[in-house]
Image (cartoon, rainbow, N blue to C red):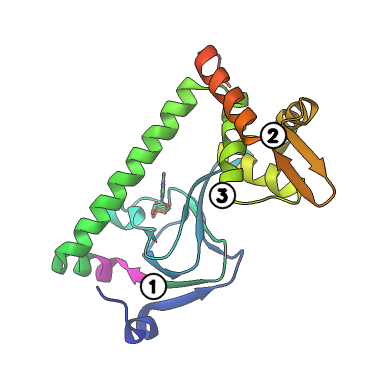
């Protein structure tokens, strides 16, 4: 299905930054294709929330509830203002049946997501919480610069699915050992040293304890 202004007029939706598109557990009658913007897919466990994936232009989400008629498996939140195409169940089914290249794209994406989920399971089994937090801090700094500690703590806690206080206590250790520097308006990080610590922890500490 090629995106055109006409299609947007018929199926288009705009969500402002921060808006919840749908929540985990709700019944789902539509799937969405992102024309513009970023959407965060999150799953909650107790009072913790874990970011499963951040989706961008051309990605889709919300197809699972349409395929298996079960409640939404995760929540979707607009990270930026989003321009989306919303397809109801019948339209989705028709597009799949009549457009093999769209159907193939859906299968491809679903298998990429399963592969990523398998990778996350592997990391959960292999590494303890502290190691996962350290790895996620290194990855967060690969994505952007941080000036506020609270932003870094929030991002890492969402990505790892642990509480903010657990992230803070690891950051404190890293500040005490000068791997992270906290100066007014800027957080600095010794990436090489952080990678070295992460590698050391991953190889030296097989973990069997429950987190
Ligand atoms: P649905 O279950 O309808 O609603 C939540 C959506 O989040 C789901 O469809 C998928 O589109 C998407 N989703 C669920 N799990 C993952 C995951 N592990 N990675 C990326 N997207 C996911």
Q: Which residue is mark 2?
A: 167
The secondary structure type at the circle numbered 2 is: helix
From the viewer's perspective, is the residue at label 3 or at label 1 nearer?
A: 3
Q: Position of residue 32 (x, y in %)?
A: 39, 65
Q: 97 left or right of 86?
A: left
The secondary structure type at the circle numbered 3 is: helix
- Spatial CA span between label 3 and label 2: 18 Å
- Spatial CA span between label 2 and label 1: 37 Å
Residue 33 is one of the magenta-drawn residues: no
Residue 86 is one of the magenta-drawn residues: yes
Badge 3 or badge 2: first in the primary sequence: 3
Residue at 50% of width from left, 76% of height from top?
14
Compared to residue 76, the image places residue 94 above or below, namely below
From the viewer's perspective, is the residue at label 2 or at label 1 nearer?
A: 2
Specify start and end residues of the magenta stretch as a single range: 85-92
Q: Which residue is mark 3?
A: 143
Residue at 77% of width from left, 38% of height from top?
181
Indicate the quadrant where residue 119 lies: top left
Badge 3 or badge 1: first in the primary sequence: 1
- Spatial CA span between label 3 and label 1: 27 Å
Q: Would you say residue 115 is visible in this rendering? A: yes
């Amino acid at each position: 299905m090629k995106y055109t202004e006409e299609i947007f007029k018929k199926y288009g939706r705009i969500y402002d930054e921060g808006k919840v598109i749908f929540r985990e557990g709700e019944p789902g009658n539509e799937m969405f294709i992102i024309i513009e913007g970023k959407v965060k897919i999150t799953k909650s466990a107790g009072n913790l929330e874990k970011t499963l994936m951040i989706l961008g232009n051309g990605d889709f989400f919300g197809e699972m509830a349409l395929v298996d008629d079960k409640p939404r498996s995760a929540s979707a939140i607009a990270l930026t203002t989003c321009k989306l195409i919303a397809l109801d169940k019948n339209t989705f089914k028709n597009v799949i049946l009549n457009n093999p290249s769209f159907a193939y794209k859906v299968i491809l994406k679903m298998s990429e997501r399963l592969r990523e989920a398998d990778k996350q399971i592997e990391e959960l089994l292999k590494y303890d919480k502290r190691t996962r937090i350290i790895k996620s801090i290194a990855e967060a700094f690969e994505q952007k610069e941080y000036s506020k500690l609270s932003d870094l703590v929030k991002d890492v806690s969402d990505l790892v699915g642990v509480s903010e206080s657990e992230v803070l206590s690891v950051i404190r250790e890293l500040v005490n050992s000068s791997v992270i520097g906290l100066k007014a308006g800027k957080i600095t990080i010794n990436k090489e040293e952080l990678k070295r610590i992460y590698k050391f922890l991953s190889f030296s500490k097989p973990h069997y304890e429950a987190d």
